[in-house]
Image: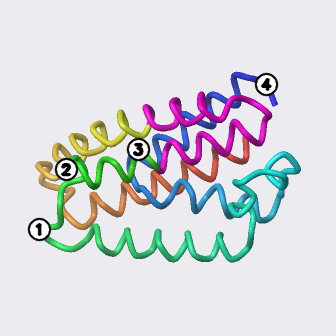
Amino acid sequence: MKNSSIFLQTIGLGAVAGMRATMAPAVASHYLSNHPDPALSRSSLRFIQLPVTAIVTKLLSVAEIAGDKIPNGPDRIILPQLLARVASGAFVGATIFKANRKSVFEGMILGGVSALAATYASFYARKYADKLPFLKEPFSGAVEDAVALGTGISILKA
C-alpha cells in the first residue's frame, strides 16, 4: 500500500476513534477478521484478526453508542474519556502501520494525535449542533454515529 494511503487510513480511523472510542477497533477488527494480514499474523497484534475480537469490539461499540444517549453522561474531553479515545486511535494506528510493515511507534503517534484532534473537534461540533433548533439530542448523536461508522467503513474499503 502507498505511504499516502497508510497515513490517510491511520488519520481517518484515528478520527473515528476520537468520535467513538470503540468503533475504530471494531471496524478494523471486522475488516481484518475477513481479510487477515500475514504481517499481523506473526505479531502481538494478531488477536485483532480473530472473529471473536470482531464480535467483542462490535458489542463494545453498541454499548458505547447506547451509553452516549444517556442524559448527563460524562463529556468526551474529560481525562478518562480522552485517554480512551487517544489509546484507541493509537491502537488502530499501530495496527495499520504494522500490517504495512511500517514503524508501530509512528502509527501509534499518528493515530493517537488524530484521535485527540477529532475528540475535541467532534465535542465542539456536537455542542454547536445541539444548539440548532432542528437537531437535538439524541439525533445529533445518531448523526455522529452514522458519520463515524460510515467513515470507518469507507476508509478500509479504499
Which mark is drawn over residue 72? 1
User: Which is nearer the eye, 156 or 25?
Assistant: 25
Label 1 neighbourhood size at 10 Å, few (<14), some (14-19), many (20+)? few
Residue 96: in magenta span: yes
Disc 1 residue type?
Asn
Q: Main secondary structure of the magenta part?
A: helix
Q: Horizontal placement of 45 versus 126: left or right?
A: right
The residue where tag 3 is placed is 86
C-beta proximity under 8 Å, tags 2 and 3: no
Q: Which residue is mark 4?
A: 2
Residue beneath disc 2 = 78
Sequence-first tag of 4 and 2: 4
Q: Which residues are magenta?
A: 88-114
Q: SS at mark 1?
A: loop
Nearer the observer: mark 1 or 3; the answer is 3
Establish if 147 lies above or below 94. below
* Mark toward the start of the polypeptide (2 vs 1): 1
Cα–Cα span, label 4 and label 2: 36 Å
